[in-house]
Image (cartoon, helix red, strand yellow):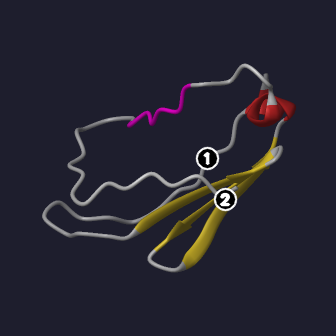
Amino acid sequence: MARTQASAEISAKQGEWHHLEVIIRGTVMTVHLDGNQVVTLDSPGFAHPTKTQFGMTVNGTTIDFDNLKVFATE
């Protein structure tokens, strides 16, 4: 299971807004926060031909999203 998970510790304070970018290309997911790469993960599940869902999990408290956009890279 460890090869299908990645995490990064970040410092964010309540009331602050940040720019989050998640890019999935083939089997690789890369996450940038405020323009800095914070984590990358290579997992064959990302490129699975029947994968149709994407979601985010927040540990701890809640999170607000504004101007959420989803684009196809191909």
Q: Position of residue 24 (x, y in %)?
A: 68, 51
Quadrant position of residue 50: top right
Question: Magenta: predominant secondary structure element?
Answer: loop
User: In front: 1, or 28?
Assistant: 28
Q: Position of residue 20 (x, y in %)?
A: 43, 64
Instruction: Give the farthest residue toward the front.
Output: 74
Residue drawn 45% across the image and 36% down it: 56
Q: Amino acid at mark 2?
A: Val
User: In front: 59, or 49?
Assistant: 49
Residue 33's place in the image compared with 5, above or below, is below
Label 1 – label 2 distance at C-alpha? 7 Å
Q: Is residue 2 magenta?
A: no
Q: Which residue bears the numbered disc 1?
A: 7
Q: Which residue bears the numbered disc 2?
A: 39
Disc 2 crowd rating (10 Å Cα; few below 14, some 14-19, many 20+) is some
Whether tag 1 and tag 2 are in contact, CB under 8 A, the answer is: yes
Magenta residues (range) = 53-58
Quadrant position of residue 5: top right
Disc 1 crowd rating (10 Å Cα; few below 14, some 14-19, many 20+) is few
Q: Is residue 56 magenta?
A: yes
For label 2, the SS is strand
Q: Position of residue 64 (x, y in %)?
A: 20, 49
For label 1, the SS is loop
Q: Position of residue 12 (x, y in %)?
A: 32, 64
Residue 44's place in the image compared with 30, above or below, is above
Q: Is residue 4 left or right of residue 57?
A: right
Q: Amino acid at mark 1?
A: Ser
Quadrant position of residue 74: bottom right
Q: Earlier in the sequence, mark 1 or mark 2?
A: 1
User: In front: 69, or 74?
Assistant: 74
